[in-house]
Amino acid sequence: MARVTIQHVAQAAGVSPSTVSNFLNDRQGRMVAATRTRIETAISELGYRPNRAARQLRNGKTQTVGLVVPSVGNPFWGAFAHEVEVAALALGCSVLLCNSERDPERERRYVEELWEDGVRSIILCTSLPSLDHVSNVIAEGLRLVTFDRPAQPNDPESVVSISIDNNVGGQVATAHLLELGHTSIAFVSGSIRSVNRSARYRGYCDAIEAAGLSVADMPQWTGMDAAHFGDVEAAEVGRAAARDLFADPKNAPTAVVAINDMTALGFCRGLRDLGLKVGRDVSVIGFDDIILADLYDPPLTSVRQPITRMAQLAVSEAVERGSNESTDPGSSVLLRPELVVRESTEHVPATPRP
Amino acid sequence: MARVTIQHVAQAAGVSPSTVSNFLNDRQGRMVAATRTRIETAISELGYRPNRAARQLRNGKTQTVGLVVPSVGNPFWGAFAHEVEVAALALGCSVLLCNSERDPERERRYVEELWEDGVRSIILCTSLPSLDHVSNVIAEGLRLVTFDRPAQPNDPESVVSISIDNNVGGQVATAHLLELGHTSIAFVSGSIRSVNRSARYRGYCDAIEAAGLSVADMPQWTGMDAAHFGDVEAAEVGRAAARDLFADPKNAPTAVVAINDMTALGFCRGLRDLGLKVGRDVSVIGFDDIILADLYDPPLTSVRQPITRMAQLAVSEAVERGSNESTDPGSSVLLRPELVVRESTEHVPATPRP
DNA sequence: TGAAATCGGTGTAACGATGCACTGACCATA
DNA sequence: TATGGTCAGTGCATCGTTACACCGATTTCA
């Protein structure tokens, strides 16, 4: 089965390869209808599919979207990667998968390699405050879509962000706990230098103070200062937080806002280690609403990110803007998160724990 | 920043492009050491990286590994995809991700498209009994590694399988429950036409009968006959199974072997809906040992698949055999699964449930 | 009616890497 | 000194597509 090339199509249609190429690339301005149909039938009869490598070599671009996530092993990123692939498929693109392990240096290397390999659109899931590490590639024309990281003031103009409003998310989560009567609410998060973390934390602070309470009075957990920890370890962070926060029961929270569901689930596991019951003893709320939130016992209250919609937006920004050369600034999107109340959050216990 | 090509390197090293190409492709048989070093320094000084597209166009191959999983959204496949990417990176390959949604037609299309795009090695995660749908591509020379699907008698010779021994897994899981005193053990699975399911089921049957019991006496659940259901829906399967099996409490099992952890977790969720407690009331065991098994409440007993090792094996089979043109039959691997006992399996309750 | 404009396409030289067939220099043998 | 053989490296056509420059035929318009 030798490859069917554009020459075969040209011959079958009785035109020159150039004309077929013009047809394929929508430069049909000057082309009589009959020619068009002859080419169309020739293509379908021969089952012609353009050779990607040749195309890429010629114009220095791929139809591939790069997807850089912290780790597909994490259920949230796995689910997102899935949605991205589905959305990209619908637009006729493939997805090249890269795990950054939340390492800025790997992020940079991946982005640079993808660029050099002709990938012109990348969906970068990062939560680094600055994009300096990839700014040179952006300057050369990379269409970068950041996900789960709202646009920052210093971002290059061409960068588009698809994200939920983490500040609102933090507020909604915290307000929910406040409404349940909690007044001792801890914020649990691992990674420090993340824009998400700070936005969610700010939302948490805002809600606390709006309720007339003081953040300073809340139980604090400073987090594991490990410079290097992946995404799968998020659960470990939660578990450690539970251990530490309840080391001194007098000063322990009655409710916890976790930075994401994995950390929340780890926290629940930690509570279990201590003989405490989620919901009854301590309310826990997470972020993301991964599939396991609903499966958990008790089902986890969470701030949902609409990943299907977000993946579609990200892919269409990456691909469609990537195709036309317009310097259209593109549109960053800040979606409203949605609170999904389940059973891990309950009214504050009437009697203080023993 | 114009691209550095092999010509630039050649010029800098004072040789012809052909010589540089020879160097790059390890055809250094006849090449004096001085030339070699001149080329080496030229490459590193100029920061030369070969152009993938040109290479691919020239020899019709990519250095990319195709990875076809049912859905990266499923935590097990997400974790596996992660390990594959890590292993591929170590060998200098990228990974092209495809979700088959367990649809044979999509599987076929993806495999064919990857092949036509020059991908010569594919890790296919399927559980279809036959590989007929991709046999034409295999015949043309595709290096196919199947994962989580043991080699079948009718498979083409060149196909390599990396899998655990599912039969043993089924036995180990069931034997564990038998040891705990259970005599009413159900097998819960969704997909019907899967080689995994049948192997695990056979293991289950073997263990039951080895204990002097009869499979016919066990509570049966025929499964949802949906022709089409994805991988993420696995949890739904478990939940439905719980509902159905306990519809008639007199005839309900005291323990359950689930086809995988997602189904097991769904089953646990179903039990919870019914007011039953996992472990105390009903023992549940899953397969895969995904990260959430340990996080769950109660932590889930599971038959672990050593995915890191398996991913390494799969990638090395795919890439290293792919590189040399030997028709070395390659070696299928059947790893021993490992039982991880946690708290979702307990001794059979002394008193029958009300 | 003749010059220009338009129409519908075609010829050709790249894009960067590769590998076969070749060459010129040197050495050994007869 | 012919003859042949090895050594170290080179020339060139090629992979499939694309885009620019070009071309002959028809139409337009003053």
Image (cartoon, coloured by chain):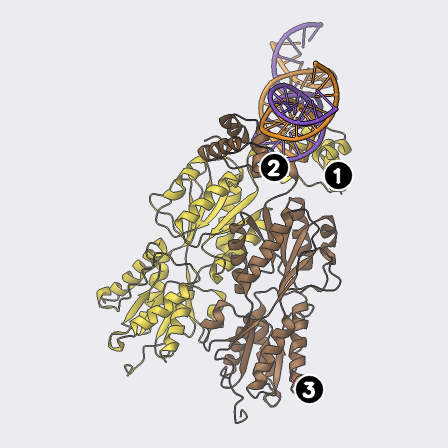
Chain colours: A yellow, B brown, C purple, D orange
Badge 1 marks a residue whose secondary structure is helix
Q: Is residue A117 above or below residue B109?
A: above
**Residue sitting at x 51%, y 68%:** B290
Q: Is residue B40 visible?
A: yes
* Res A11 quadrant in image: top right
Q: Chain of mark 2?
A: B
Q: What stretch of residues is rendered in magenta?
A: B212-218
Gap in angstroms between the C-alphas marked 3 and 1: 62 Å
- Residue linked to disc 3: B214
- Residue linked to disc 2: B27
Q: Residue furthest bottom?
A: B351
The amino acid type, in three-letter code, at marker 3 is Ser
Q: Give the mark, 3 or 2, whose residue is nearer the N terminus.
A: 2
Image quarter hosting the C terminus of chain A: bottom left
**A170 to the left or right of C6:** left
Q: Is residue A42 above or below residue D20?
A: below
Tell me whether marks 3 and 2 sit on the same chain: yes
The amino acid type, in three-letter code, at marker 1 is Thr
**Residue sitting at x 63%, y 37%:** B57
Gap in angstroms between the C-alphas marked 3 and 2: 64 Å
Q: Is residue A92 magenta?
A: no
Gap in angstroms between the C-alphas marked 1 and 2: 45 Å
**Residue sitting at x 27%, y 65%:** A208
The amino acid type, in three-letter code, at marker 2 is Arg
**Residue sitting at x 42%, y 43%:** A159
| Marker disc for residue A41 | 1
Q: Is residue A332 visible?
A: no
Badge 2 marks a residue whose secondary structure is loop
